[in-house]
């Protein structure tokens, strides 16, 4: 239930933020002002779209983790997962990927094409390494259907890592497109936004992974 | 580089030339809206036919042998799921959301047109997968629209093999489609409003669709989570939801799963879903009432706040669907309380609709009839909701026809009346033609009175203890014979109402070609979609220049003004003053 409470708190927070942001106390029938600022958020649509998408993904993973916690507490036959050691290494790799994406984004912001290009590719490679590491972790926890059927903890491990991995693969697709544009000779200034959004997405997925890992470790 | 508001950019949007790009693989929000609406209405007609078949069985048991018990459960399931998700959600958000948001906000299109197009095609795929389940061995799932495990995946339930899997895959696909569309609707409302269109000047239709989309974006993941986990339970044999079960005398491999967990996840989506359908209806009906009563909406700010409050509260009431599953009494108390609290903002909306009509210059046009009809059906459905929100009242009534009557009144009939009203209201703008008003009115009266003939008696049946979900009642001792008579009468009414849909379809289709040409603003409405340079609006909506908004959406019957409406894009006349009061001191 605690996770559900967090989800609810998050939703309430969003609602409150929204109420404040959009000045819901205006009396439009009295307003005689000339049209001016309409209260749009000063950011590109892609950036806003990304943040909304992150809220959706937050909801998704919060619910997965709530389900994990409830399945653990509400029913019999739960045995804890033995955390494979490789997950620590994977976490560091994903952290490195996230840092690389940040460096790429800042370099693009300062117009440093070469640095941006190299760190972008490094970020992609590290992400692929992370995904490969996750596959190794699958091998370590129990590679056959027998284990997945027998232990809900292992089944959850597969579901959570797959869901997270698929989001990273989606990110890699966008990153791949940015890399292709680089290769096609696009100006670094045109890629600034793309890289900045990629960096945000990578940081977010790092946080999601840490939350998943934390729940697997401590709950 | 300084930020340039979207309304100030003059970059051209996508510019299709071929027929294929204009009408099939289209990125234009209006075309996508019509695509969404047509597919939703088609699949809704399938669900309508299913309900007719069920009613034949219930009204005249043993007369129609082509409906066997398995098919009956399959029809129930598909009818419920299609109506709630593939018709109402898709039509309100994919259809009206797509059509109205850019036009009412003064934008040229959605902010991510390509993703918008994908949203429709993925939705189309979801519908195809859903309909495919009718043709697989075992047929579609008959688990009931809530798909509760363990029975949903156990042998013995119709469609327990491929049927349920296709349903879950279709739902997951729908959620992907909805997320793509939803990101568009929210971002467009936040960012692409034209000059002068502050959030608090937006028509309530946009507010309702906007909030419903936020609810959908946050609630649908719960359905996705449950669909993924149930698919795994059903295919590879995990035990997320499946407890140890004996099935057909055999012990299955599942153990320790929690069916209650599924119920929590399902209803964490399922209750907001009610408001995903209801909030757009609330918004649209507000605009219809105000326009056709020639009077500003009563309590605009309160209406906006109520939409937000209902949206927030809808996330903390889900367990009221689970009273009969058994729960801690304190838990039940909490959910009963939140459920009753949500009646407060809802009642505020109802009072405001009625007060909007009060002393208005009511024009009983077809859309207005449907809007007023909605107030009746919604009040009736809402009041029975207050009964069922209480644990002690819900327990004996939950498995009876009282609940069927309640939810059909509140989230079946009511939103559908708004859908019809909205179609009649915007049809002249969408098609450029008027329809036959007499046929429209006939359609209204048959639908409105007919639905009362169907659902009002169901409440009595429920209080008598007639159980829902039963294929046939047989000779049940505690039920008087009149129950069977009532059931037959309900079926006749249902068939008449279903038949009245044909009048609607005939009217809409024939008027496309033969209807008289519609003027650009036949209802003399204030909102922006009626002020477009072309009817129907062309690609890009506004010609060379975007509109500029000078006032709120409800300047009807302004004292001193020459007409009884002032469109939102008409500048303030210094002689008249600016807003609603226009120099008249109260």
Image: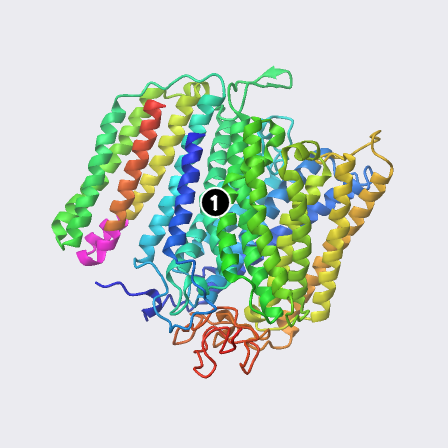
Q: Is residue B528 left or right of residue B440?
A: left
**Is A127 left or right of B427, judged from the image as shown?**
left
Q: Which residues are magenta?
A: A176-195
State the residue at coordinates (30%, 59%): A42
Name the residue located 22 percent from the left edge and 58 percent from the top edge: A190
Secondary element at tag 1: helix
Q: Is residue B165 magenta?
A: no
B55 and A54: which one is in front? A54
Query: Residue B457: x, y in percent?
Result: 78, 45
Disc 1 crowd, CA 10 A, few/some/many (<14, 14-19, 20+) = many
User: Main SS of the magenta segment?
Assistant: helix
Q: Quadrant of the N terminus of chain B?
A: bottom left
- On screen, residue B82 versus residue A139, left or right, reads right
Q: Position of residue B121 (x, y in %)?
A: 48, 52
State the image quarter where residue B200 is shown.
bottom left
Chain letter for the residue marked with disc 1 in the picture: B
Q: Is residue B129 visible?
A: no
Rendering coords of residue B179 (x, y %): 44, 48
What residue does disc 1 label? B175
Task: From the viewer's side, name the closer residue of A27 and B75.
Answer: A27
Apparent side of residue A157 relative to residue B457 in the rendered image (left or right):
left
Task: Please tell me whether residue B571 is drawn above or below residue B504 in the rendered image.
Answer: below
Is-magenta flag for residue A183? yes
Q: Can residue A209 be seen at all in this image of the molecule?
A: yes
* Position of residue A163 measured from the top left corner of the image (x, y, whole percent): 38, 35
Q: Residue at x 84, y 29 (%)?
A: B477
In the image, is residue A144 above or below residue B496? above
User: Looking at this rendering, what residue extends furthest in the right direction?
Assistant: B481
Q: Is residue B297 above or below residue A128?
A: below
What is the residue that sits farthest to the front in this orientation? Answer: B586
């Amino acid at each position: 239930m605690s996770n559900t409470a967090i989800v609810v708190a998050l939703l309430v927070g969003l609602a409150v933020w929204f109420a404040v942001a959009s000045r819901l106390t205006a009396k439009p029938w009295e307003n005689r002002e000339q049209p001016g600022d309409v209260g749009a958020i000063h950011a590109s649509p892609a950036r806003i779209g990304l943040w909304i998408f992150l809220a959706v993904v937050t909801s998704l993973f919060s619910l997965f983790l709530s389900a994990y916690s409830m399945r653990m507490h509400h029913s019999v036959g739960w045995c804890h997962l033995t955390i494979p050691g490789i997950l620590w290494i994977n976490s560091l790799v994903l952290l490195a990927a996230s840092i690389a994406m940040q460096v790429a984004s800042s370099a693009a912001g300062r117009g440093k094409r070469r640095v941006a290009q190299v760190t972008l590719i490094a970020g992609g490679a590290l992400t692929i390494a992370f995904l490969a590491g996750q596959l190794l972790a699958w091998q370590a926890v129990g590679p056959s259907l027998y284990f997945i059927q027998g232990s809900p903890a292992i089944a959850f491990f597969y579901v959570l890592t797959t869901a997270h991995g698929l989001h990273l693969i989606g990110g890699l697709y966008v990153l791949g497109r940015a890399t292709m544009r680089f290769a096609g000779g696009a100006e670094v200034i045109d890629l600034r936004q793309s890289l900045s959004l990629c960096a945000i997405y990578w940081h977010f997925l790092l946080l999601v992974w840490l939350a998943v890992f934390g729940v697997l470790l401590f709950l | 580089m300084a930020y340039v508001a979207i309304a100030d950019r003059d970059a051209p949007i996508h510019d299709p030339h071929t027929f294929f790009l204009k009408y099939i693989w289209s990125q234009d929000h209006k075309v996508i809206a019509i695509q969404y609406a047509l597919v939703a209405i088609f699949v809704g007609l399938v669900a309508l036919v299913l309900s007719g078949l069920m009613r034949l069985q219930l009204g005249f048991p043993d007369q129609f042998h082509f409906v066997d018990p398995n098919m009956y459960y399959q029809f129930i399931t598909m009818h419920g799921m299609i109506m709630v998700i593939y018709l109402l959600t898709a039509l309100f958000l994919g259809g009206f959301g797509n059509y109205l948001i850019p036009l009412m906000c003064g934008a040229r299109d959605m902010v991510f047109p390509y993703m918008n197009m994908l949203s429709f095609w993925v939705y189309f795929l979801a519908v195809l997968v859903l309909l495919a389940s009718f043709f697989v061995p075992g047929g579609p799932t008959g688990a009931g629209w809530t798909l509760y495990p363990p029975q949903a995946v156990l042998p013995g339930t119709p469609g327990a093999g491929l049927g349920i899997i296709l349903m879950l895959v279709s739902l997951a696909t729908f959620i992907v489609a909805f997320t793509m569309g939803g990101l568009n609707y929210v971002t467009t409302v936040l960012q692409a409003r034209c000059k002068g269109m502050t959030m608090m000047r937006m028509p309530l239709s946009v507010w309702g669709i906007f909030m419903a989309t936020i609810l959908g974006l946050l609630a649908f993941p719960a359905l996705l989570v449950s669909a993924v986990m149930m698919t795994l339970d059903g295919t590879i044999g995990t035990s997320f939801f499946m407890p140890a079960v004996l099935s057909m005398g055999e012990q299955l491999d599942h153990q320790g799963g929690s069916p209650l967990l599924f119920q929590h996840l399902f209803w964490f989506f399922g209750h907001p879903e009610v408001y995903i359908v209801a909030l757009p209806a609330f918004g649209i009906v507000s605009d219809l009432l105000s326009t056709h009563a020639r009077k500003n909406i009563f309590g605009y700010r309160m209406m906006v706040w109520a939409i937000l409050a209902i949206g927030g509260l809808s996330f903390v009431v889900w367990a009221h669907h689970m009273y009969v599953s058994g729960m801690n009494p304190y838990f039940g108390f909490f959910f009963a309380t939140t459920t009753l609290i949500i009646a407060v903002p809802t009642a505020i909306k109802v009072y405001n609709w009625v007060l909007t009509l009060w002393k208005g210059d009511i024009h009983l046009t077809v859309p207005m009839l449907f809007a007023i009809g909605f107030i009746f059906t919604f009040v009736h459905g809402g009041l029975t909701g207050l009964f069922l929100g209480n644990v002690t009242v819900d327990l004996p009534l939950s498995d009876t026809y009282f609940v069927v009557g309640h939810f059909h009144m509140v989230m079946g009939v009511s939103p559908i009346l708004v859908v019809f009203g909205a179609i009649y209201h915007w049809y002249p703008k969408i098609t450029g033609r008027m329809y036959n008003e007499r046929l429209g009115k006939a359609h209204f009266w048959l639908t409105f009175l007919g639905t009362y003939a169907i659902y009002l008696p169901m409440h009595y049946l429920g209080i008598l203890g007639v159980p829902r979900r039963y294929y046939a009642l047989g000779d049940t001792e505690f039920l008087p014979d009149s129950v069977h008579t009532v059931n037959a009468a309900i079926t006749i009414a249902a068939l008449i109402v279903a038949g009245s849909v044909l009048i609607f379809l005939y009217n809409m289709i024939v008027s496309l070609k033969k209807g008289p040409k519609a003027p650009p603003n036949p209802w003399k409405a204030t909102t922006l979609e009626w002020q477009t340079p072309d009817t129907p609006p062309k690609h890009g909506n506004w010609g060379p220049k975007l509109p500029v908004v000078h006032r709120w959406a409800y300047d009807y019957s302004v004292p001193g003004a020459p007409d009884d409406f002032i469109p939102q894009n008409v500048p303030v006349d210094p002689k008249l003053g600016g807003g609603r009061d226009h120099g008249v001191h109260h």
